[in-house]
Image: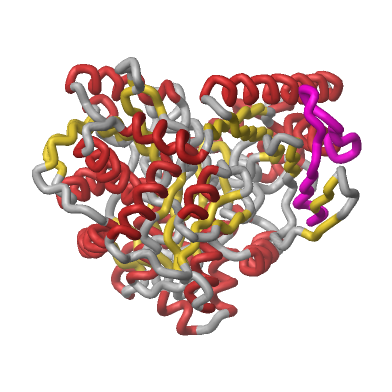
């Protein structure tokens, strides 16, 4: 069925929700928008589905949410009655339609006799991961689009270990979803009926209390009565209550919340983007920081899995630390304090992604701790924790990725901005007790391990045409790989789609022991590197860069030169494909 026929099918459906029908009547006269809404089905990928809200098979709405849930329900039925009884935990964030979608999930699962535990109000993604384990559920779902713009929402699925689903389960669920012929006719049960039958259970404070209790286990030094001044913003999302309760339990008494961004707001009206990776998201927090003379500013994204931190630099101005920098500070503090207290296991391990700074490997190595790389995406770090737990080969210590995701305590199996906020505050308190700012602590780490600098460039290319342009970029680099850049030879090429690591100097080839992925990474002869990959959650091509130099200035100059040269080639490819 082509997109025109799909559009007509939806328009002819008498029971279509009124707001969707109204939207359809508007877009049916706009062929480009109509085609983009119906030219394909919303894809169930490694983390579930994420997309724009609206009518159509390629959008997030009641019917596509039911379709995705129906696929999961059939997968659960395959696992037997115990899986249905253990059930599914559902959480949701502050976005448009999030609570409504959460209920649709419960109504669809309940129709199949699957018990569903739904949070009574919005909750962070990491608490959903914790709740799956705490309630011994078979799976979890969180309705969120993380840090995407307001027009997006998503459907993210977790396995019984609290981590995102492994590829095998994703493939099985996808096959069930693909077999559904008409998403408009999926049967659901009534909310009250499910409540009466015990198939729908609302949860809340009991899980909060258990999660907060676990948060205390990551604290390495008591901070009771700490004079640290903290400004925190949840950016209109889910972290407000738990971060504040957690900071209080850690002994932090001077916490100021950005009032304008405290309450949930699906439009994220005070920011251009609710993403703590974007420095603009800290504008209000910086104003508060100046008024309070705060030591640390912290911001979480809407579903509270990412944490951004700003601290004063050498000139007394607030600067937003990168995810790599904050990760280095947390990691160094964690390992040094555990070593001092005799808590560092002989078989400890640190896990990071292939696009995360190499400074983490250098820090961990200085404590005798190995670092393991995974593909981009915290699900792969969660998988490693699960492997270590079963094999006993390693004891997990810390995991992080450059995109502001960190995990200290493995009672959660995804990046956790709540525990990261508490731990970041503890790190700041540690440096303040030494008469140092966190920024000075970072410079101290650079002096010891080298001046590592990294950056990320993103190119947003929306719709069907954009997807084709992104693939053109990847094809161009595969078919015509760069030999040198800014006068530096490319020494190693890693293609994660072919699983090959090619040393261009020796001519040798090794196999990469990671799942196949559309990622290219290039190392230069001076140990600099850059990576290309399409985003798995947004219509973007992403370009990562990393260098190491003898000084901050030299590193920054080298980083900019490599970045500018690469992006010039990328933009020429896009221009040629228009």
Residue 540: quadrant of the picture: top right
What residue is shown at x 49% (from left), y 60% (from top)? 369
Q: Residue furthest bottom?
A: 81
Tell me what residue is drawn at x 36 percent, y 38 percent: 300
Residue 56: give x, y in percent of width and height: 63, 41
- Residue 499 on the magenta segment: yes
Name the quadrant of the C terminus.
top right
In the drawing, does residue 366 fall left or right of residue 221?
right
Vertical comparison of 88 with 275: above or below? below
| Residue 270 rendering spot, x and y as whole percentages | 35, 22
> Which of the pair 432/197 is nearer the observer?
432
Q: Which residues are magenta?
A: 476-500
Depth check: give the residue in front, 230 or 41.
230
* Up/down of 409 relative to 111, above or below: above
Residue drawn 64% across the image and 35% down it: 544
Eyeballing the image, is 556 above or below 175?
above
| Rendered image coloring scheme | secondary structure
Q: Say how many tags the image has.
A: 0
Residue 193 visible at all = no
Residue 378 spot, x, y in % from top left: 53, 53
Q: Is residue 142 left or right of residue 285?
A: right
| Residue 158 is one of the magenta-drawn residues | no
Q: Is residue 395 left or right of residue 435?
A: right
Q: Using the rendered image of the protein, determine whether residue 320 is visible from the camera's viewpoint.
A: yes
In which image quadrant can residue 480 be found? Answer: top right
Q: What is the residue that sits farthest to the left in this orientation?
A: 225
- Taking 570 as reference, is 335 left or right? left
Of residues 198 and 339, the one nearer the viewer is: 339
How far across and down, in percent of the image, does residue 170 sit? 63, 63
Residue visible at 55% across and 34% down in the picture: 452
């Amino acid at each position: 069925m082509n997109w025109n026929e799909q559009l007509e099918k939806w328009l002819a459906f008498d029971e279509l929700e009124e707001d969707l029908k109204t939207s359809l009547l508007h877009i049916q006269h706009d062929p480009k928008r109509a085609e983009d809404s119906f030219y394909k089905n919303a894809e169930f990928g490694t983390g579930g589905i994420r997309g724009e809200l609206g009518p159509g098979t390629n959008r997030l709405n009641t019917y596509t949410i039911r379709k995705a849930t129906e696929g999961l329900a059939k997968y659960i039925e395959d696992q037997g009655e115990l899986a249905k009884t253990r059930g599914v935990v559902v959480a949701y964030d502050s976005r448009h339609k999030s609570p409504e979608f959460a209920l649709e999930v419960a109504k669809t699962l309940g129709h199949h006799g699957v018990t569903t535990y739904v949070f009574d109000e919005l909750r962070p993604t990491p608490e959903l991961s914790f709740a799956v384990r705490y309630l011994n559920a078979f799976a979890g779902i969180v309705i969120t689009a993380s840090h995407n713009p307001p027009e997006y929402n998503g459907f993210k699925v977790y396995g019984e270990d609290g981590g995102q689903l492994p590829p095998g389960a994703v493939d099985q669920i996808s096959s069930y979803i693909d077999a559904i012929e008409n998403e408009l006719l999926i049967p659901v049960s009534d909310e009250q009926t499910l409540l009466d039958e015990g198939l729908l259970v609302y949860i809340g404070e009991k899980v909060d209390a258990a999660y907060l209790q676990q948060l205390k286990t990551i604290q390495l030094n008591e901070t009771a009565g700490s004079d640290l001044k903290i400004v925190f913003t949840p950016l209109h999302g889910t972290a407000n209550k738990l971060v504040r309760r957690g900071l209080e339990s850690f002994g932090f008494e001077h916490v100021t919340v950005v009032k304008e961004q405290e309450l949930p707001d699906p439009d994220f009206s005070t920011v251009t983007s609710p993403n703590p990776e974007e420095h603009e998201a800290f504008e209000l927090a910086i104003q508060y920081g100046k008024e309070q003379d705060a030591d640390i500013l912290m911001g979480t994204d809407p579903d509270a899995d990412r944490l951004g931190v700003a601290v004063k630099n050498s000139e007394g101005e607030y600067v937003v630390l990168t995810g790599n920098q904050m990760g280095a500070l947390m990691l160094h503090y964690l390992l040094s304090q555990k070593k001092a207290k005799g808590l560092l296991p002989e078989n400890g391990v640190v896990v990071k992604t292939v696009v995360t700074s190499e400074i983490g490997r250098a820090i961990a190595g200085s404590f005798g701790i190995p670092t393991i790389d995974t593909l981009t995406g915290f699900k792969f770090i969660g998988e490693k924790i699960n492997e270590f737990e079963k094999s006993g080969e390693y004891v997990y210590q810390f995991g992080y990725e450059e995109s502001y995701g960190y995990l200290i305590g493995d009672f959660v199996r995804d990046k956790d901005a709540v525990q990261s906020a508490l731990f970041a505050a503890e790190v700041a308190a540690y440096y303040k007790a030494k008469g140092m700012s966190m920024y000075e602590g970072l410079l101290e780490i650079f002096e010891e391990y080298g001046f590592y600098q990294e950056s990320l460039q993103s190119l947003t290319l929306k719709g069907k045409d954009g997807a084709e342009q992104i693939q053109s970029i990847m094809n161009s680099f595969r078919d015509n790989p760069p030999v040198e850049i800014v006068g530096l030879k490319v020494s190693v090429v890693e293609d994660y789609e072919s699983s090959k690591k090619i040393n261009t100097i020796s001519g040798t080839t090794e196999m990469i022991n990671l799942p196949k992925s559309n990622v290219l990474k290039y190392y230069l002869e001076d140990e600099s590197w850059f990576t290309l990959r399409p985003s798995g959650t947004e219509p973007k091509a992403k370009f990562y860069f990393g260098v190491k130099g003898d000084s901050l200035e030299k590193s920054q100059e080298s980083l900019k030169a490599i970045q500018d040269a690469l992006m010039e080639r990328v933009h020429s490819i896009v221009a040629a494909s228009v």
